[in-house]
Image: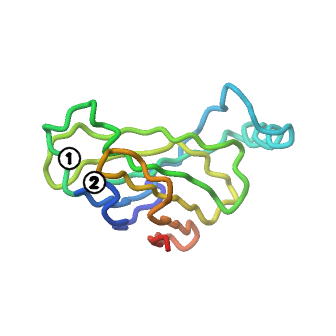
Amino acid sequence: MLQAFDVDCGELVPGHNFIARGLAGPYELTVPQEWDGDAGEYEQMLEYLDGGGYLGFSLEYELAPGVPPQSDGAALFRYLVGIQYEADVPLPWEPQDGGAIAPFTGGDTTHGSRGDWPLPPQARVLTFSLYPVSSEGFTEEEPAGHLVVDLQKAEAHWRPAG
């Protein structure tokens, strides 16, 4: 793990708390196939790649309690919290939100991972805006709050919106 923590961000999925567990990585990212940034950003990214690659990471989390097994694959999106990522320095490209969630088996928790996101070498603070899922299974338009990770202090905090 790049950084481990244990931050309860509250009930972001009906009946399940979102518990941020840490940042996995770092590992090398590949350059996006289609570039939609400006030429200066592209040159900056190429410099990082020439220097050994651009590092990336993912956000590891758990839903507690775990998602019960009767939840079929069609209901997958009912358990995916919306996440927007930003750093305190410019990112080389607009981060795309990918990831995975463990099979639904119930139990105490269900593990998930989101990313892969770029980690600029100069970044000190990462902010994740977390968007809850409604009871109808749709991601809300306003964030419930922000998970703020201070890489230098090795601390993470939940800041509810409002």
Vertically, is 36 above or below 82?
above
| Residue that mark 1 sits on | 67
Residue 16 locus on image (x, y percent): 25, 57
User: Left or right: where does residue 116 sit relative to residue 120?
Assistant: left
Please name the amino acid that badge 2 sits on: Leu
User: Left or right: where does residue 38 sit relative to residue 77?
Assistant: right
Residue furthest front in the image = 136
CB-based contact (under 8 Å), mark 1 and mark 2: yes
**Residue drawn where x is 63% and y is 65% of the image:** 124
Instruction: Name the disc covering residue 23, or none.
Output: none
Residue 6 appears in the picture as rendered: no
Q: Nearer the viewer, residue 75 or 39?
A: 75
Quarter holding residue 44: top right
**Residue drawn where x is 61% and y is 56% of the image:** 86
Please name the amino acid that badge 1 sits on: Val
| Residue that mark 2 sits on | 63
